[in-house]
Image: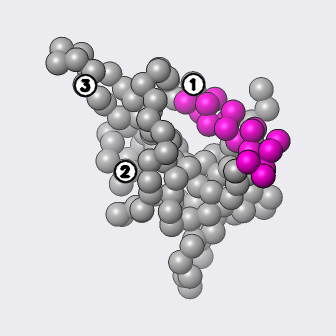
Amino acid sequence: MKTVAKLIHQSNMTYIPTNLPVKFFGLPDGKVYLLYARFCIIRPEKTDLEFVIAEHDEFSFDYASEKLVPKAETRYPVYREMVDKPNPVYHILDINRDVKSYAEAVALLNQKAIKMSLHPEAC
């Protein structure tokens, strides 16, 4: 499968409220997406993982040049690590409990990116 979602940054210690790794991706629609897992309780005796896809509200992504673009003007250089910052502003788009690994979750995000690149008017 062709990879369309571009990895911007991955962090194991993050400001996102999870103890698990967070991956930040740029998609053809020019937005930055977060992908992370968090623990959830399905039944009182069973803890499981749910995977979250969220959109970062403070950055956009120039897909053609693979550059991170802050939405607020800054006089400082922009580095990819800046997407993982204190008090990030983002909103959750999807929570999936059927996905069992980061590889499956990244594949799902990549499928979304492929649809975006094939049909950009639908975004």
* Residue 46, position as x, y percentages in the image: 24, 16
Q: Is residue 70 visible?
A: yes
Query: How are the colours assigned in the image?
Result: one colour
Query: As shown in the figure, which amino acid type bears the numbered disc 2?
Result: Ile
Q: Which residues are magenta?
A: 105-122
* Residue 64, position as x, y percentages in the image: 80, 58
Residue at 69% in and 33% down: 111
Quadrant where the N terminus is found in the figure? top right
* Residue 16, position as x, y percentages in the image: 37, 50
Q: Separation of disc 2 and disc 1 at Cα?
A: 21 Å
Mark 3 Cα within 10 Å, few/some/many (few <14, many 20+)? Answer: few
Query: As shown in the figure, which amino acid type bears the numbered disc 1?
Result: Glu
Q: Is residue 9 visible?
A: no
Which element type, helix, strand or loop, lies under badge 1? helix
Residue at 80% in and 44% down: 119
Disc 2: which residue: 16
- Residue 41 marker: 3
Disc 1: which residue: 104
User: Looking at this view, is 106 or 11 the one in front?
Assistant: 106
Residue at 51% in and 57% down: 56
So how many labels did they put on this image?
A: 3
Query: As shown in the figure, which amino acid type bears the numbered disc 3?
Result: Ile
Q: Separation of disc 2 and disc 3 at Cα?
A: 19 Å
